[in-house]
């Protein structure tokens, strides 16, 4: 006989990933898609988008590095990239070698390209 585990509705905030039931088929599909391209999740509120990402973050596949970071309050692309980079450094998601490559690449690009899509880059100030 199967054991019935009662499900308690949750009305907000994040729950323990082991308490997120279902969504496993979607998650497996998303990992397969992410192996070769990105995905975007769009749905009305309260459909479980955040829980899918939360569960994926806590049960990552090999060769994937996951970052769960709220983007609320990021007003422009530069601020988003800066906050994401700081989060990755803070949580040791990037090796020193990769950090150095990012910073060298940024310096190299901004010394040649001063503006793109209306965003002004400063070669003397590395946002990363």
Image (tube, rainbow, N blue to C red):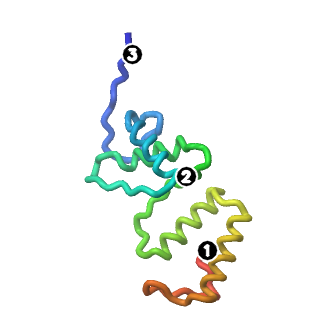
Query: Callout 2: 10 Å neighbours few (<14), some, many (20+)?
Result: some
Rendered residue at 66%/57% (across/down): 92
Q: Please, what secondary structure does the residue beneath circle 2 have?
A: loop
Tally of marks: 3
- Earlier in the chain: of badge 2 and badge 1, it is 2
Rendered residue at 39%/16% (across/down): 3
Foreground residue, 78 or 7? 78
Q: Is residue 4 above or below residue 43?
A: above
User: Is residue 20 shown left or right of residue 62?
Assistant: left
CA separation in Å, label 2 and label 1: 19 Å
Q: Nearer the viewer, mark 3 or mark 2?
A: 2
Q: Which residue in the structure is indicated by mark 1? A: 128
Q: Which residue in the structure is indicated by mark 2? A: 66
Foreground residue, 61 or 10? 61
Say if mark 2 contacts mark 1, CB within 8 Å: no
Outermost residue to the top? 1
User: Is residue 1 shown left or right of residue 90?
Assistant: left
Query: Callout 1: 10 Å neighbours few (<14), some, many (20+)?
Result: some
List x then y, in percent, for residue 24: 42, 36
Q: Please, what secondary structure does the residue beneath circle 3 have?
A: loop
- Earlier in the chain: of badge 3 and badge 2, it is 3
- Earlier in the chain: of badge 1 and badge 3, it is 3
Q: Which residue in the structure is indicated by mark 3? A: 3
Rendered residue at 53%/41% (across/down): 59
CA separation in Å, label 1 and label 3: 51 Å
Q: Quadrant of the N terminus?
A: top left
CA separation in Å, label 3 and label 2: 33 Å
Q: Please, what secondary structure does the residue beneath circle 1 have?
A: loop
List x then y, in percent, for residue 76: 43, 76
List x then y, in percent, for residue 54: 46, 46
Which quadrant holds residue 88?
bottom right
């Amino acid at each position: 006989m199967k054991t019935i585990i009662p499900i308690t509705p949750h009305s907000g905030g994040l729950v323990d990933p082991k308490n997120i039931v279902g969504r496993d088929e979607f998650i497996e599909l998303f990992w397969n898609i992410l192996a070769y391209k990105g995905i975007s999740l769009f749905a009305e509120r309260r459909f479980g988008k955040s829980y899918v990402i939360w569960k994926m973050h806590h049960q990552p596949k090999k060769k994937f590095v996951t970052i769960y970071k709220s983007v609320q309050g990021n007003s422009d692309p530069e601020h988003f990239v800066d906050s994401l980079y700081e989060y990755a450094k803070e949580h040791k998601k990037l090796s020193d070698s990769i950090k150095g490559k990012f910073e060298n690449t940024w310096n190299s690009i901004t010394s040649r390209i001063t503006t793109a899509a209306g965003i002004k880059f400063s070669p003397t100030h590395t946002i990363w």
